Image (cartoon, rainbow, N blue to C red):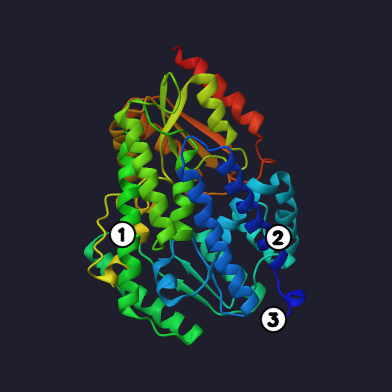
Amino acid sequence: MANTAELEGVKEIEQIIGGMGMAIQGLEANPSKFKSDRLFFEAVKAYYERLHRANLAGEPIADSGLFVPVEVYRAMDIPYFLAEYHSILLTGMIGEGIFRFMDIAESYGLSNEICSPHRVAIGLAKSGMIPRPSFAVSTATSCDQTLKLYENLANVYGIPAFLVDSPYGSSERDLAYARTQVKKLIAFLEEQTGKKLDLDRLREVIAISKQCYDYWEKICDLRKSVPCPIGSRDSIKDFGVLVTSAGTPQGLRYFQDRYQEIKARVDQKLGAIPNERHRVAWLYVLPLFDLSIADWMEQEFEAVLVVDTMSYASDIVLDPSDPIDYLAKKPLKSGFIKLTYGDGGVTGFSKMMAQQIRDYRADVAMMLAHWSCRQYCATAKMLRDDVTQEAGVPFLIVDGDLLDSRVVSGAQMRNKISEFFKTLGK
């Protein structure tokens, strides 16, 4: 075991694990509406515990993008660190303390217009506050800034990097190319770790992963119910478990229990709030520095987010009988990837958003124009015009940033949302 005084990120990861443990204890003492909330913290805690053990033991660690098919890591017993997810999680824990790491990244040379989770990730790396990785892996999805993040992390640490050149489309030609990329990823991981992939073990992991995704898709469908059975923030937990724990028993238990609890609420016609007045389709992601905005919308305007782009399962069919094909298709199961960057470009995305609004019976559409997100901000007006015409619902663009409240504060966002609801006149 390495000298912990010389290791990076030991104390910081221990604090994360401790925070998860405290959350679990709190839910045991005072259970929430959903018992599966505790399983969320247990799953994410187990992910960080595995990472922590690897750091202490000097095992190779992958610095990984969110949309790399993590099942291959699980099958090869490779611990992985999700730089973007960690940045988001940490923001929820330390609030404005996160600005420090953005500033460090900017002093390193990153523009303040770079995506805030990416600036935080670089700032944490430069501060020695996360486990030192042995190699980096990213995907061509979700955005160009993601590519540059992992290039920068590789430069900071002086480590090799691999790009899974995942296509944006889902044609057979696209998927054939994606399968070649999965094979190259496996070869890269074998070279970096000295481990050989056991296909039988991969099939075991994928079998569990498939069940996780099946339950997640069912949960997404349950949100179509009137009234919507879960609140605006609940779906964010699902994404966290998918990226940290897909293919694990902890992840499967979470999704099994989550589905059963939500299904029971639908059967009993129980909504997230007593009187559902508005059903909101939220395009892109909530402002993650202030998720209480969602609670405020429920309380102030009886408005529930029934669907959002990040927590939406696409129509891609995952077949576990072919492990390579499964891994190639899996990133496209995320609506965030398949709908935003996939077939049909902006026009196709607009049509799919309009269809979502109809399927989920939303009467309002909103979009966070995350100011450093080139593709969303560049298409915001086109999306608003097209979706309004296709679906016939009012559409609000909310300016802001995912993590940096200095761009637009939570109070400013609330003011804009409040004025919007006043114009609806109902």
Q: Is residue 7 above or below residue 363?
A: below
* 279 or 131: nearer the viewer: 131
* 223 or 352: nearer the viewer: 223
Residue at 57% across, 48% down: 24
Answer whether labels 1 and 3 touch (C-beta < 8 Å).
Answer: no
Q: Which residue is mark 3?
A: 2
Amino acid type, residue under disc 2 in the picture: Ala
Point out the residue furthest to the top here: 425
- Label 3 secondary element: loop
Indicate the quadrant where residue 108 lies: bottom right
Q: Quadrant of the C terminus?
A: top left
Report how far apart the C-alphas of labels 1 and 3 lie in the structure: 37 Å
Indicate the quadrant where residue 160 lies: bottom right
* 343 or 87: nearer the viewer: 87
- Label 1 secondary element: helix
The mark nearer the N terminus, 1 or 3, is: 3
Q: Which residue is mark 2?
A: 105
Q: Quadrant of the N terminus?
A: bottom right
Dot 1, crowdedness within 10 Å: few (<14), some or many (≥20)?
some
